[in-house]
Image (cartoon, rainbow, N blue to C red):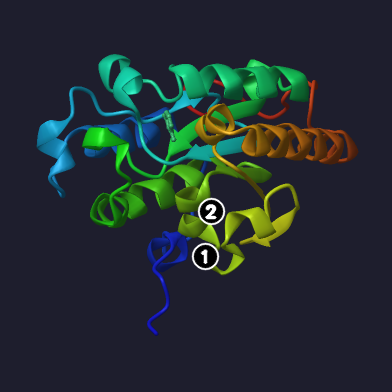
Amino acid sequence: MPARPTVDSVWPVTPRSGPRSRAEWAQLNREIENCRACPLGSLRTQVVIHRGSLRPRVLFVGEAPGASEDKVGIPFVGAAGKRLDLLIQQLGLLESEFAIVNVIKCHPPGNQFSEVAAEACRPFLARQVEFLQPIMVVTLGAPALAAFRPDLLPILGSAGRRFRWRGLALFPLVHPASAARSNAFRRRWEQDGAALSRLLSRLGAGGRTATGPTSEATV
Ligand code: URA
């Protein structure tokens, strides 16, 4: 069986030279905004790119924008976002310490995850992770986990534990929307969130001020 494509297959091949600049981030955002590589590009209201810090310690990666996100152009602003925001608050992460992106950047009708769209968006996700340089990626739901480590599926076998991806910590969680659909998933969301909280405390990531240079030119 051919290997399932992941972010690794499109990871930027050119080694980074020089600091990350706002111009580089703006250029990436422009490319995402102008993308029409799959049918979702002409169906969306707004492209949904990123929320939070440009120097995050923890990067949350969701599946795809829902209808609320499509309206405002910001990830996780709907019901699932409220649950995620509560977790982020419980983790003690400051605004400067986390960011949120999605595997797919445009709202798929009916919230049906689209492999075609994931394929088209994959280089953008790779460049976002490469630019943001978190110490940990927290995947939300099975398609987000599959974008990095499909070998860790099914998600219930790996959610709530720490793994590695390209030298970063990778921590899968079930999707916050699934926690609203069943008590079993809600318990799993809460238990695994508590495990993430303990891990972040050990790593010294929660509730601390981010460090590093921030100027007009560099982020
Ligand atoms: N679900 C996601 O996976 N992403 C969002 O941005 C909103 C809901």
**Mark 2 vs mark 1: which is more N-terminal?**
2
Q: Left or right: 53 with respect to 170? A: left
Percent across and percent down for residue 49 are 36, 31
Q: Is disc 1's CB within 8 Å of ligand 1?
A: no
Residue under the point 67% across and 44% down: 136
SS at circle 1 = helix
Pointer 2 with pointer 1, Cβ within 8 A: yes
Q: Which mark is residue 41?
A: none
Q: Nearer the viewer, residue 114 or 149?
A: 114
Percent across and percent down for residue 37 are 15, 49
Location of residue 152 by image quarter: bottom right
Percent across and percent down for residue 38 are 16, 48
Q: Is disc 2's CB within 8 Å of ligand 1?
A: no
> Disc 2 to disc 1, how far (Cα)?
6 Å
Percent across and percent down for residue 100 are 51, 31
Residue under the point 55% across and 16% down: 82
Which amino acid type corresponds to the residue marked 2 in the rendered image?
A: Leu
Q: Left or right: 25 with respect to 187? A: left
Q: Nearer the viewer, residue 179 or 27?
A: 179
Q: Give the vertical position of 209 relative to 157 (above or below).
A: above
Q: Give the vertical position of 3 relative to 204 (above or below).
A: below
Q: Give the vertical position of 112 relative to 167 (above or below).
A: above
Judging by the rendered image, the residue that carries numbered circle 2 is: 145
Q: Left or right: 27 with respect to 10? A: left
Which amino acid type corresponds to the residue marked 1 in the rendered image?
A: Pro
Q: Give the vertical position of 118 relative to 182 (above or below).
A: below
Residue under the point 38% across and 63% down: 10
SS at circle 2 = helix
Judging by the rendered image, the residue that carries numbered circle 1 is: 150
Give the class, few, some or many, for how many residues have Cα within 10 Å of label 1's Cα (few <14, many ≥20). Answer: some
